[in-house]
Amino acid sequence: MATASASPSLFLRSSSSCGGRTNIITLRSSHSRFPHLNRRHVKKSLTLTVSASVSVSNPELRAAPDDLVSSILSKVLETDGGVLLKSQEHKEVAEMAQQLQNYCLNEPVKSPLIFGEWDVAYCSQPTSPGGGYRSAVGRLFFKTKQMTQVIEAPDIVRNKITFTALGFLDGEVSLKGKLKALDTEWIQVVFEAPELKLGSWEARYGGESQVKLRITYIDEKIRLGVGSRGSLFVFQRK
């Protein structure tokens, strides 16, 4: 999650194939070879055969995304958004994300799967989500509890970071933005000024900001995205 200004923002960030045979069947030929069969019966039988053939999925093609999704989640969860991962582990996450791109929907921006509530599970630049609150110095004073993103139809994005300040004071930073599709893979979100809550105190600060993200994979469990500056994000559906 990159920010266009000093204000914290969560990046919006984010196909299986079915195998089957295609049979070309000429009813006239079948009828001439078997004149005693009723044409309607033959047509019905052949239709059922073809339909069954194309509806059977190829388990090998579906197994790859499921395995990769499980692997990438096991690697990034419980790592404080990637902060606890070493350099080699970040490379392994990037390699799995690259493989998952081969299974992405053709036009992920148009998929209804983008809507819903997501946890920000990982960023290749761990201090990027949340701006100063997630920097090395910021983490000394603000312990992140959760980073979430809600995408509401048709174009509303709500980001929130909840934290504990100084070990005892609950707080949160939230942003509301409007989503715009730039093409079939890239999206842009323009955020309003962030709102800070610290205990009973509330305030707005900073100004408008915007982010861009390319959705590289999405399914019922996760969404992957690459920011305009190259940061990789992994979102897990709540």
Image: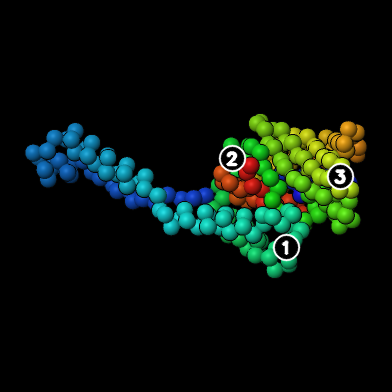
- Residue pointed to by mark 3: 168
Q: Spatial distance from mark 3 to mark 2, Cα to Cα? A: 37 Å
How many residues crowd mark 1 within 10 Å: few (<14), some (14–19), many (20+)?
Answer: some
Disc 1 residue type?
A: Leu
Mark 3 or mark 1, earlier in chain: 1
Give residue 85's mark: 1
- Residue found 13% across the figure and 35% down from its top: 38
Q: Quick check: can you spot residue 140? A: yes
Tell me where residue 185 appears, x and y as whole percent: 64, 46
Q: Where is residue 157 in the image (x, y as percent from the top left)?
A: 72, 36
Numbered mark located on residue 113 in the image: 2
The kind of secondary structure element at disc 2 is helix
The disc labelled 2 sits on which kind of residue? Leu
User: In terms of secondary structure, where does tag 3 sit?
Assistant: loop
Q: Residue at x 75, y 45 (%)?
A: 146
Q: Is residue 202 left or right of residue 185?
A: right
Question: In percent of the image, x 58 and y 59: which residue is there?
Answer: 71
Q: Judge whether residue 191 can be spotted in this image.
A: no
Q: Which mark is residue 167?
A: none
* Neighbours of disc 3 within 10 Å: few (<14), some (14-19), many (20+): few
Q: Can you tell which of label 3 and label 1 is closer to the viewer? A: 3
Residue furthest bottom as drawn:
88
Residue 93, quarter of the rendered image? bottom right
